[in-house]
Amino acid sequence: MKVGGYEVPEDLYYSREHEWVRVEGKLARVGVTDYAQKRLGDVVYVELPEVGRRVEQASETKSKAMELGALESIKAVVAIYAPLSGVVEDVNQALRDRPELVNTDPYGEGWVCLVEASNLETELKNLMSASAYAEFLKGLK
């Protein structure tokens, strides 16, 4: 679906920090949304997480999720937050040489990492569906 000029695929889960999650068996593929990449502008560098690194989703006791990495554009540097808890199993090495994939294909070739989620079913409930994320976007300026 399209919301305010932004693509919001219906088969994904979304965080309030504009990361997306695609469940692939026990793994969760993570990237940044179309909204995030358009707001940031041309991505010139992607700081990827380390494979094997343990990450945590935000919780009631921890207001912010753990940083996975960062995106750098001409305009700004922004953090990529862990939408789920678990261990980073793989990273998108293509982003090292072609960070612009985040802009050209945020839901495909521009993915950031794969996380083996430690509490997938429970933590997915803390993320938004596509329709909930679309409503969330409508409230942003």
Image (cartoon, helix red, strand yellow):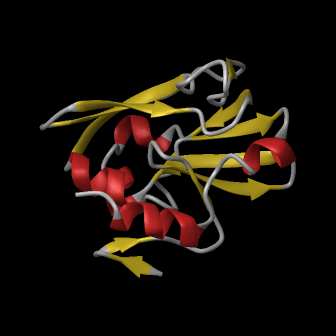
Instruction: Say which quadrant the C terminus sits in.
Output: bottom left
- Identify whether 36 is placed above or below 55: below
Q: Could you tell me which residue is drawn at 40 percent across and 80 percent down?
A: 2
Q: In the visual, does 23 lie left or right of 104?
A: right
Q: Position of residue 67 (x, y in %)?
A: 51, 23
Q: Could you tell me which residue is drawn at 75 percent across and 56 percent down?
A: 23
Q: Across the whole image, how many numbered discs are drawn on residues?
A: 0
Residue found at the very far bottom of the displayed protein: 1
- Identify whether 108 is placed above or below 70: below
- Identify whether 11 is placed above or below 60: below
Q: Position of residue 48 (x, y in %)?
A: 49, 28
Q: Could you tell me which residue is drawn at 86 percent across and 54 percent down?
A: 25
Q: Could you tell me which residue is drawn at 38 percent across and 62 percent down?
A: 137
Q: Position of residue 117 (x, y in %)?
A: 79, 37
- Identify whether 139 is placed above or below 98: below
Where, by quadrant of the figure, is residue 99 drawn? top left
Q: Position of residue 133 (x, y in %)?
A: 50, 63
